[in-house]
Image (cartoon, grey):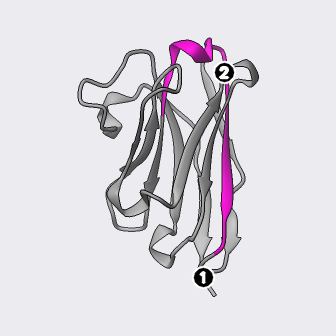
Amino acid sequence: QVQLVESGGGLVQPGGSLRLTCVISGFPLDHLYIAWFRQAPGKEREGVSYINNNGDYTYYKTSVKDRFIISRDNAQNTVHLQMNSLKPEDTAIYYCAGVDRPLRDGRPHHSNFDYWGLGIQVTVSS
């Protein structure tokens, strides 16, 4: 059974940083393609960032490009999302998601992912 568990969320002031971690178990991580999604109240779940199985391809939503960095350590079964220069509009529940095949267009959509974590709250506020 594949499990994804997020950690590292919390409350941070605008301009601050957080590092989210997703620990994956029950499936060899080097066979999984991982994305981070977020969902704010009243909004659709959106793909924030994506990394392929060996880490040589990444995708970022335009609004987070140059602020967020996705990385993975297959030996440690972890994927990280380093979030810098956080803005109030980054406030949302963040989800880690996985799928065992590459995305055709390299852009994450929630309908393409089979495995999900429970999510973790990120709040950016002064």
Q: Residue at position x 53%, y 46% from top?
A: 95
Read off the residue under disc 2. Answer: 74
The foreground one among 59 and 116 is: 59
63 is higher (above) or lower (below) than 34: below
- Under circle 2, the secondary element is helix
Per the rendered image, the range of residues in magenta is: 16-34
Whole-Å distance between the Cαs marked 2 and 1?
33 Å
Q: Residue at position x 45%, y 54% from top?
A: 38
Read off the residue under disc 1. Answer: 125
39 is higher (above) or lower (below) than 124: above
- Contact? badges 2 and 1 (CB < 8 Å): no
Please give left or right for residue 80 compared with residue 91 in the image: right
- Under circle 1, the secondary element is loop
Residue 65 location (% of width, % of height): 42, 57
Q: Amino acid at mark 2?
A: Asn
Please give left or right for residue 30 compared with residue 114 in the image: right
Dividing the picture into quadrants, the one containing residue 39 is bottom left
Q: Quadrant of the C terminus?
A: bottom right
